Each structure stands twice: as C-alpha cells, then as structure tokens.
Amino acid sequence: MCAFSIGTETDGSVIFPADRNAVVGIKPTVGLTSTRGVIPEAPSLDTVGAFGRSVEDAAIVLDIIAEKDSIPQEDVGTGDTSLGRTGTGREYTSWLAKRDALKGAKFGRPWTRVWEAASNNPRYKSQYLALGNLIKEIEDAGARVLDADFPSAGEIISPDGWDWQYADGVSGSELSEFEVVKAEFYRSLSNYLHTLGDNKEEILTLEDVIAYNIKHTDKEGGIPGTHPAWPTGQDNFDRCVESKDDSEALYRKALEYNRRKSREEGIDAAMALGRDELDGLLVPVQAEGGVACSVAAKAGYPMITIPVGVGDDGVPFGMGIIHKGWQEAKLIKFASAIEDLVHHRPQPKFFNFDADNYTYVGKPPSDDAN
C-alpha cells in the first residue's frame, strides 16, 4: 500500500510488524540513524529503521537515513573514517545480491531457547517446517548452516517467550532490560519534553503525563478499566516513575549486564563459533516467541527480516538474520540473496477487520463495548 515506511525500535518494534506484514524490516545498529525528534524510550536501545516491500527498497531508505561517519573508528577496523556509513565506502544498495552470493557463506542457527522453542511450539508448526525447508534450500545453494548457540541463552532468554523483565535466569530481575528502559525513559522523556517549542499544557515530566492521562482518562485511559484500549491504565508509566529512586549504580549494573550477556557472551560468541567467523545468525521471529530479536535489541545490534510465507492462522512470517554492530551491509547482502531464493513475497489481503477504526490492545473488545 506504500513504497516504504520508517519506524522506531527499542525491542521488536521494527522487526515484529515487518515479519507479520510480509515486508522487509531493517533494524539498524543503535547510533547508525539519527533519533532527533523521536520521543525516546531508552536511548541505549532506540534506533530508527526502514520497512520496504523488498530488501532493495529498504536498503534505499537506509542509505538516505543513515548518518555519515556514524561508525566508530574502532569498529571500522581500518582506521579510515572516510569509509563512513558501511565501513567500506559503498552505499548499502551496492551490496544487493542474488542467490549465488550464498555459495561459501556460513550461517549460525542458535538452537537453545531459540530454534528449540520454535520446534516445541505446536501453534507454529507450519512456520517451523517452512523455515526448516528454507534452511535446506540455503544449504543447497552452497551455504553452510551450523549450530551456534548464545552462551548466555539460559540467563537472558525466557523459556516462555519474549520477556524484557527476564535476566539472570528469572523474570523480574533487577538486571533485566526493563530496568534499563525504566531508568532511561524517565530521564530522557523529561529532556525531550523540555525541548518542545509548543507545550501549552506545560507537560514537562513523566509525572505530568500521568496526571494528564488521569484527568482525561475517558480518552487517554489513565485509570485502569476506563478505556478498552488500555485495560491496565498506565501501569508501566507508574513503574518508570518509581525508578527515579533507584541508584545510578543499579542502572549501570543492569546496562552493563545486558550488553555483556547479549554481545560478548551472546551474539559475538555465537558469530565467532570458535575461530570460524559466521556471516550471520538465522532465526525465526514468531515461532520462538520473538526472543532472538530481543537479544539483538539488548546488544544494540542490527537485524533484518525477509518474508517467507503465510502461517495456518493467515499471518505472514519470515526469516530473521542477526549480525554484529555496524554490519548492515552484510545483512543486506545475504538477506537479498535469500530473498532471491524465496523468489516471492506473500501478497497482502484486506480482511476489513478494523474498518470502524477501533484501536485496542490485547483481546478484541466485545460487540457491546462503547
């Protein structure tokens, strides 16, 4: 219905909708694209990404929105800062490839808590089988697909699916990603609100936002049970306000934990596979509950998803690829090669499901809802 779209992600907000809507989604490394003007949730995790009907379309957009020379010199590896956005001096679209690019490529397949979860989920059996067949096609095209677990999987990936409160092997840990988000959101939102040129309501803090939502609860749902779109009210806002009393040391400890477990003990370790550097990690996006995407989010690393098929429930699904920081060029290369292998994109169908423009979160409202 449109040529492209741009969206923000903290944890899943580019990859999840792209995967479910049969389009390509690129979630860039945190820092590659500007977040100026974006309402912040957690600056250490927030990034602006691109949606497109093809890898090429999304790559064109990424070339436009990527910040020149945003890659830290130490991550380029050459000492030449003129290499700019891709670390190679080339535009992202120059990395577009056909299936021949898969010859000699090596990919990892994280099993523990990722593909393992997909294999045990009866709801997504057809997706798991379809993605397994695609992996076979990738191998037939000349690539190797090897088992490559995240060493920290048991600590930071919930066995029950996506859970940003999960860390240190339990849900609700003070080391979780949500602890980082709470602290950063409370601080950064206030900074954002103070930069607004037009703020007639003089809303300058999260407390002001909460008070406004309570005062206008019939429209904003500030009080639980007063608006069907927000049945729990603004409980997460309340929890973020509580974080203002947490120590800086606690926030720093959680931030360091999440980065280390998702980078050095997560994606970096899986990509290394001993001494055999991989070209990317292949992951499902829905069948495993969205947990692989969350590892990439915690690390601030890039990810891309390519449409593959349509599930038994009528919802499209795709294959995700994760790489280390600033490696968007390689993601585009191999995603476009796999896209060429798939050779089709599920065409959208309009079911007229929400023609009355009723927006809700959670279960659909009852027919007699006001």
Image (cartoon, helix red, strand yellow):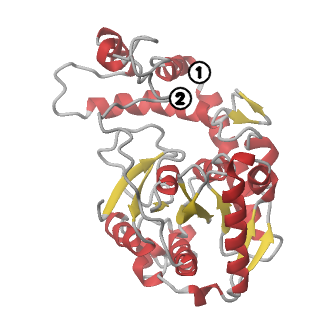
Q: Residue at x 68, y 55 (%)?
A: 263
User: Image check: 197 left or right of 99?
Assistant: left
Is 14 drawn above or below residue 229 in the view shown?
A: below
Q: Earlier in the sequence, mark 2 or mark 1?
A: 2
Q: Residue at x 67, y 61 (%)?
A: 283
In the rendering, which numbered label is found on residue 148?
Answer: none
Q: Residue at x 34, y 12 (%)?
A: 211
User: Image check: 80 left or right of 253?
Assistant: left
Residue 91 visible in the current orientation: no
Nearer to us: label 2 or label 1: 2
Tell me the kind of residue under disc 1: Asp
The x and y percentages for residue 192 are 32, 34
**What residue is pinned by disc 2?**
182
The x and y percentages for residue 174 are 69, 28
**In terms of image quadrants, where is residue 246?**
top right
Q: Quadrant of the C terminus?
A: top left
In the rendering, which numbered label is found on residue 246?
Answer: 1
Q: Quadrant of the N terminus?
A: bottom left
Q: Nearer the viewer, residue 105 or 264?
A: 105
The x and y percentages for residue 334 are 57, 77
